[in-house]
Image (cartoon, rainbow, N blue to C red):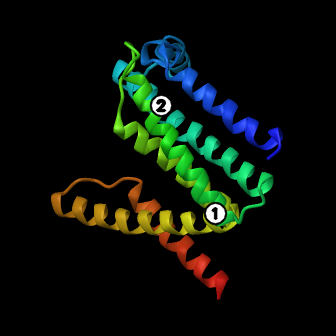
Amino acid sequence: MAPIYWLPPVLWMGMIFGLSTDVGSAEHTASWLEPVFRAVLPGATPAVIEALHLLVRKTAHATEYAVLAALWFRAFARGRGWRPSTAAVTALGLSALWALLDEGHQTFVVSRGASLGDAFLDTTGAAAAMIVARFGWRPTARVLTTAMLWIALLGGAGVLVLNAVVGVPSGVLWITAPAAALLLALRWRRTR
């Protein structure tokens, strides 16, 4: 396999390893992320700023491993000529293994801690990338959009009923739940 295919995922693994040192600790990322949040959201409470910081950190976990899996997928599918399904499973396996090793590495870093939850989040990001790589953007987006509309419709309807029973106003749900139903009906009609 030519270096043009295997070098990017190996370099990306090195970057992940570097970020699992003190450089990527919550204290360091807070030092530059929290001022950005305060500038963009001047009225945000400290709890909101902290929640946004956590959200960015967890999103970064999933994203960095989605990129890693995609790079390995490219290396195996194009560099080796493997079938997409074989390339996807192998890329996912390597990414999951690296997530576990990375978390293990963090047990030796004073400012970091190992978390199986983070390894699961990393693997989830890698799996999401492999679903897209295997089936393509459009089919994946179509399925996810339909699933989200059903969740909005059923979840919204359930909350509307619950709010009506306990006497709590539902606000914007009176718009979003019917809008989800309308969009599902339009999608169904278009595919007929």
Q: Is residue 34 visible?
A: no
Q: Is residue 145 above or below residue 39?
A: below
Q: Is residue 61 above or below residue 89?
A: above
Examine the image and state in which quarter residue 173 appears: bottom left
Identified by mark 1, the residue type is Thr
Which residue is at the far left?
166
> At numbered mark 1, what does the secondary structure look like: helix, strand or loop?
helix
**Direction from residue 96 to residue 6 in the image, left or right:** right
Q: Position of residue 51 (x, y in %)?
A: 39, 28
Q: Is residue 185 above or below residue 26?
A: below
Q: Which residue is mark 1?
A: 86
- Binning the other alpha carbons within 10 Å of mark 2 as few (below 14), some (14 to 19) or many (20 upward) gives many
Quarter of the figure that contains the C terminus: bottom right
Q: Which residue is mark 2?
A: 102
**Direction from residue 186 to residue 20 in the image, left or right:** left
Identified by mark 2, the residue type is Asp
- Residue shown at 29%/61% (left/top)? 159
**Direction from residue 156 to residue 165 in the image, left or right:** left
Which residue is at the far bottom?
192
